[in-house]
Image: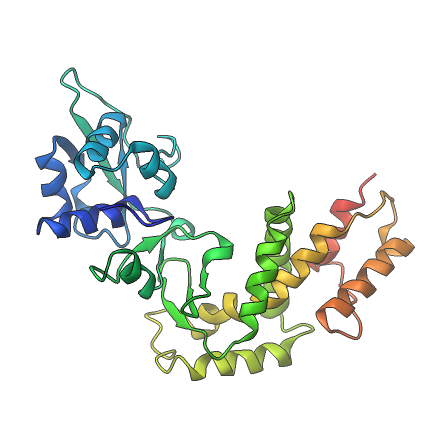
Amino acid sequence: MAPLPYESTASWLGRVAATYRQSVPELLDGIGITTTGARGADDTDTTEIHLDDAARHRLAVFARVPHHHLARALPHLERPRDANPARTPDAVGATGAGSAAWYRPDPYEQPSWACPWCPLRHTAGATARARMYLPAHRVWCSRHSCWSTRGLRPRLLDTRGLPELAHTHREHRRLLRRPNANTAYTWAQAIVTRWYDHRLYLTGRWKARGRRLAAFNPDHTTTQGSSWELTARPVIVHPETVVLARVLARTRLPATPRPDRHPAVTTFLEHTAHTLGLARLAPGPDDLLRSWIRHHTRP
């Protein structure tokens, strides 16, 4: 059973164990891998597992999947042992027995739920459940119009009411061709999220988009402890995030000690406002867009 692209190691192990009608600890014990941190063994949805070199080798042999295929599909399979303080050091005994340790990732590192129809397609109908470490350009499934939210309480959102996401998805993939795409997207996401939280510039557009999103998610009032506004925020602001990210990725500002008065900065703000569909864009001193300008005009 091959893993899905970007799948968490614990999610894949859970699917393999279910094939043999076993729990993950029973499966690992049967192939000679000693596990610690048993509290997470029964909850592969919110936990992850660290495997040493011997354990990874044993798993690859048992699953009949080449090790380099596993490493390419499972992002956390070969993470450094000190990437999470809860991990235990690799320990390979004289007999070559492997060891594994369960740990609970930080909230911002929690894997998302995969679009349920994609695992069904990849596993020939065997399962619809899988947890993924999805990059920003993969959180929206263009085939099934499904958005995977991140965080401590991830969920799936039906985005059939937002046809603009198809164009945004194509623009996002074009953005990835640029070498500074990730940096530009990170800046844009922080800037637009701040605008959304402070109800600046695009409030009317975002409210209308939020109503269309809620119409296709009738259970949006039961968000398991998190507010609907925070759950839907990444989807609602995504089109403007990608638009701004493309502008930031293409922009080169001259170094100047007074960026507020430089004509190149004025031209940049006018172009950004036009691209976002705004009549005017005047970021205040605490606006993150102003921080981006100061950062890229430092002498």
x and y percentages locating residue 177 in the rendered image: 62, 48
x and y percentages locating residue 79 in the rendered image: 38, 34
x and y percentages locating residue 37 in the rendered image: 20, 40
x and y percentages locating residue 131 in the rendered image: 32, 54
Q: Residue at x 26, y 60 (%)?
A: 129
The answer to whether residue 20 is left or right of residue 130 is: left
Between residues 57 and 124, which one lies in front from this camera angle?
124
Q: Of all residues shown, which one is farthest toward the front?
A: 124
The answer to whether residue 208 is left or right of residue 46 is: right
Reply above or below: 61 against 158: above
Rendered image coloring scheme: rainbow
The answer to whether residue 50 is left or right of residue 173 is: left
Q: Residue at x 20, y 32 (%)?
A: 61
Q: Residue at x 57, y 55 (%)?
A: 173
Residue 256, quarter of picture: top right
Reply above or below: 243 against 182: below
Residue 100, quarter of picture: top left
Could you tell me if residue 194 is visible in this image? no
